[in-house]
Amino acid sequence: MKFRFLAAVVSSSLPVLLAQDPPPPPGGFTVQRVEYAAGNANGPVTWVDGVRTELDLYHPVHASPPSGWPAVLVIHGGQADRRVRFVRERCVRLARMGYVCIAYDVRGDGATVALNPPGFAATQADALRDMADAFARTPTLLPAGVTMDPARLAVTGDSQGGRHSFRAAAWSGQALPLPVGSVTRMPSIAAIAPRIAPLSVPDDAVPNDGVLANAHTVTNLWQERGGNPADPLVQLILAQDWHALRAVMAADPLIDFLPRLRSSTVPMLIGLAWNDHKHAFWPTIDALGTIPPGVTVRTLWSTSGHSSVQNAVEEEFTDDQIRRWFDRFLKGIANGIDREPPAEVAHKPVDPARHQSLASAWTHAGLDAWPPADSHGTSFWLRAGGLLATAAPTATEPGPTLRHRVAPGYVIGAFCADDRRPVLVLAQIPLVEASFLSASVGSDHELLGRSVLRVSVDSDSGEFFVAAGLYAVAPDGTSTFVSCGADGRRGSGAGRHALEIVLDDVAMVVPAGHRLRLVLRNLALEEPPGQRFIRWTPSFRDSDVTLRIDPSDAPRLELRIADLRHAMLTPRLARGSVGAGIDQPLRIEAGASLAGAPYIVLMSGSGSWPGVALPNPIAPGATLPLNLDAWTSLSSQLAGAAPFVGTIGVLDGTGTANARFVLPPLPALAPLAGLRFTFAAGGVDPSARLWASNPIEFDVLP
């Protein structure tokens, strides 16, 4: 009887889509790919300037809407091609939901190398024009009967594709810097979704007044130019003139597109990946602060890309967010994504096994700002004996000395030739470390945002470099990398120097019982599980740098930290087949402070935002992120019973609970296919304050 009632509610929650586009069937449209390549009858595509490339089109197998399907350019990363996995998967996912997707080999990559004579034009201005050319050319390349709407266009991509996306928005509707023939303007772009690409390329390369230089940028520029000492950029690298290198980048609007983006109104969904070996977070986050408040921007900090750990669950969620972003701004669907918290973060798992698993569900938090306004600075002081203490020193204490030594003849050119690989670099620049360990933290905490280490040092050289790495140490001694930063001096003098070491932004839950370990080093190593790389270009001069520990000048770590005051529900996105039967786990992770607290998991068929404001919440302004409807009433009435198994109860001693959404493969439930349900958990803490989790989105497939 309860399952008949479940099916009867369907009619009240069927999604309402814009009449212009046919709604995708449950599971999406069938997708067809059309290939333009040298090896088939279609042949390659020739851009307006005569350069040839290969191109794939993905389209729904369904009658086109009256104005044609909205179109999305999906651009691959550097030194890859249109068939790289993320491009194929994103194109298919978007085409299933009613988009024409265009993927081609960018100039200088893929098939373009063999299809064109050596030395063919491959500047950023040419690449920008190619995007406009692709949008203009696609209607003639689609099969008969398939049409594209030239007024509904978007761009997405990772890395190089992310920079292409930013440039498309920066030149949206404007004259191109290098027009050829009929391709003179970038069409108006309705939305972009760049991933793992810096918003400010100059600041990503040289973010700290010329002291720091991105080791990836430096080695990449060197290798692109073959280390040719006659090349102007190589000369700047040899001189380690990071000020001048940044100035060269900032002078080129195709490299530094941020000034143009400040006058753009194109909605941007910006994604970054934790532990991206090419790009730190904080230069992009600082650049975001310069975007005018009237521009619609949403950020998603997660994983996957540039050797950050691959996670299929997070990748699928990211692509779903991109699809919803385009649904909102290309199709006009009021799906609420522009009303949801503007910053969503996936917490880096503190458990290395969970961090490295391809299929693990990472916890998420939706925030009104990054970093959240209710996170605060908690100070720890570096003390003699390797202590990271909560009390400042009351007398002068001996500090460690970092003795930085560089093998004779090992210069920056050799570092670039070694491609900054730690196994090679550390053979020439031995690693020197000094560690400081805290006591166990007494409760679960969230590290949210950017921490800063303020120290004073005595150096025997005017050129030196100090890095700091932060780790979470489990009771069994397992150490997990949290964040890294660096500071130093170039062109200065020996003596005393005050350093401000900015540790890159992070989101991580540090459970009760863990300790924090801060490591000072002469090299900026990042060591997330399964990775090890050098973030910032080191100094190539010997130096001795001694940390001062003195009451008047105490070395202090200011952590951006907040008490864990909400639950987290995983997985963030899931799917299940009603035809095969559904048994979806729903896991609550609320932290030990909520151990024994009552909870309930509720469901909605009408989305997560604006949700329900909580009276007397643990976190100010907290909401239960689902909209009340008939499904909510049903999930409340049947809480704890099929199909809502374990959805009411009390959290265990660690603040966790496991529920399930279970549907048997009954024909009567077939009409559920195509629905999207939202789940969220809520409850009461021992002080009678209300708490709520993040939402889970669940798609019912046929």
Image: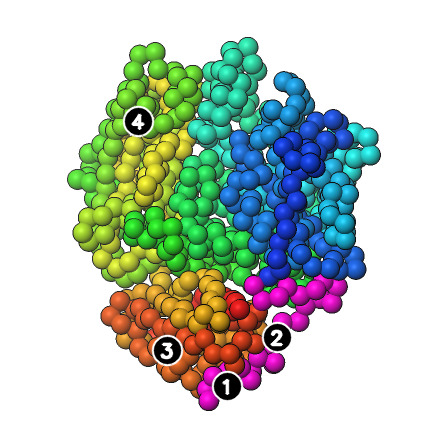
> What is the span of residues highlighted in magenta in the rendered image?
1-27
Q: Residue at x 55, y 71 (%)?
A: 673
Q: CA distance from mark 2 to mark 1?
A: 17 Å
- The answer to whether residue 452 is left or right of residue 672 is left
Is 454 located above or below residue 633 in the figure? above
Residue at horizontal 46%, vertical 24%? 219
Cα distance between the residues tagged 2 and 3: 24 Å
Relative to 48, say whether 344 is above or below.
below
Q: Quadrant of residue 647?
A: bottom left
Residue depicted at 41% across the width and 42% down the height: 308
Disc 2 residue type (three-letter): Leu
Q: Amino acid at mark 3?
A: Val
Can you identify the residue that label 3 sits on? Answer: 645
> Cα distance, mark 3 to mark 1?
17 Å
Which residue lies most toward the front here?
41
Q: Label 1 crowding class (10 Å Cα cut-off): few <14, some 14-19, many 20+?
A: few
| Residue at disc 2, secondary structure | loop
The disc at residue 14 is: 2
Q: Disc 4 designates what residue? A: 423
The residue where tag 1 is placed is 4
Q: In the current view of this chain or complex, which residue is farthest to the bottom?
A: 1
Q: CA distance from mark 4 to mark 2?
A: 57 Å
- The first of marks 1 and 4 along the sequence is 1
Separation of residues labelled 1 and 4 (CA atoms): 63 Å
Q: What is the three-letter code of the residue carrying label 1?
A: Arg
Q: Earlier in the sequence, mark 3 or mark 1?
A: 1
Q: Amino acid at mark 4?
A: Val
Query: Where residue 164 sits: x, y (%)?
Result: 62, 38
The location of residue 153, given as percent across then percent down, is 71, 49
x then y, percent, for residue 270: 56, 48
